[in-house]
Amino acid sequence: MPTLSNMLSTQQERSALLRKWYDLMIENKDDLATIITAENGKPLKEAQGEVLYSASFLEWFSEEARRVYGDVIPAAVKDRRILVLKQPVGVAAIITPWNFPSAMITRKVGAALAAGCTVVVKPAEDTPFSALALGELANQAGIPAGVYNVVPCSRQQAPAVGEVLCTDPLVAKISFTGSTATGKILLKHAAGTVKRVSMELGGHAPFIVFDSANVDRAVAGALASKYRNSGQTCVCTNRFLVQKGIHDKFVEKFAKAIESQLHVGNGFDAKTTQGPLINEKAVEKVERHISDAVSQGASIVTGGKRHSLGKNFFEPTLLSNVTTKMLCTQEETFGPLAPVIKFETEEEAIAIANAANVGLAGYFYSQDPAQIWRVAEQLEVGMVGVNEGIISSVESPFGGVKQSGLGREGSKYGIDEYLEIKYVCFGGL
């Protein structure tokens, strides 16, 4: 089975190539950001941030490539020695989403190449150009032909291509970022050949504001967590839970912040903070969630309809008087909708937050140290932001629990997803 370790004999060589790829991304960061904005409408400033975030994974894993350590274990028998080797799993199929068309590739590919695996990347059908641009820079960096491969396809062909990648016996590993529903389909396909899998699937992130919280900091965190990329990220807050004593103050300040700090427009306009949603289907889902909530008694505090720019642009929306019976608190919206639920006790908030069958990210604001420990440990999610609305970083393990996925990406743990552990017993010594 072809691996990069067969083509490049040392970890140092793989490290050097990843570092060169990183350098080229930095040199071409403006062009790469322009491609992202053109593909999915993300505001240019956010696209520029994504490129730097994306490049950081190549830099990180260029360093981790040199730290794939084995082990020596003391044996119970005198004439034996026990060794543990770590070897690349083999060909890795990488299936990525449209909302981070660059970073979701490098977070996976950086780890795979550092481990010594070759990759086949199937980018989202909405955003193939970022993957192809990364391929051009990989070629310029000197990464051998056949190591980084891109297979774009149409929306109609996507299911068939995904099935081939998951069932072909030459593919040893599947890494996917996308919806839980699609992840389950890929898992079924991969089960036939018992492939290694990493799944970063959907979220339904709670954002809890306790009475002890600093309201201004909570509002700033809420704005960043909810409306980044117009609410189209897997770790975006989907449900706001605000304690009774601070609820009205929080809603009032949050509404003012939305109205004064968020600007809907063309992603290439410097003042734009909110670009379009990815397609008409996404807009319709936001509208459906708002309509359902209002029909059950929710109030629109601000926003609530398509923006005057038309097409896929939607107003950043805040709802109050929301209950757990409403669709927007039961499904991931993936759009610029912030529903606020009022709660009375810590136990009630934890119960609501943990009622979901997914658990990717969760956030809460509190200034009570004992409460911070309790809540952080009790939230059934893979990542927790405490008094912080943005938690993603290259150094941190990214992943969820429950039906939000399997495995971790980034951090020192990310490379393990692409390595096999081999036990070697030397006898007769």
Image (spheres, helix red, strand yellow):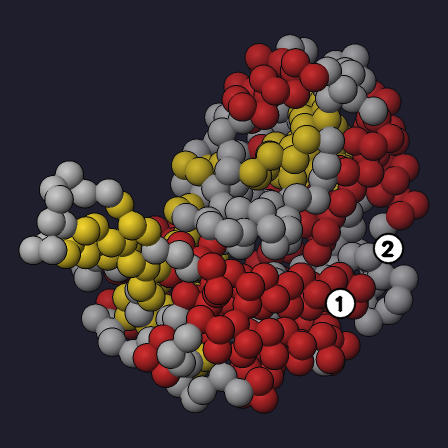
Residue 158, how many percent across, how many down? Answer: 40, 71
Residue 350, how many percent across, how many down? Answer: 56, 20
Q: Residue at x 27, y 54 (%)?
A: 84
Q: Residue at x 62, y 39 (%)?
A: 238
Above or below, 138 relative to 387: below
> In this rendering, does residue 226 appear at all?
no
In terms of image quadrants, where is residue 55?
A: bottom right
Residue 223, how many percent across, how many down? Answer: 78, 42
Q: Residue at x 45, y 87 (%)?
A: 144
Above or below, 209 relative to 233: above
> Which numbered marker is on residue 263?
2
Q: Quadrant of the C terminus?
A: bottom left
**180 on left or right of 100:** left
> Which numbered marker is on residue 147?
none
**7 on left or right of 250:** left
Residue hosting label 1: 48
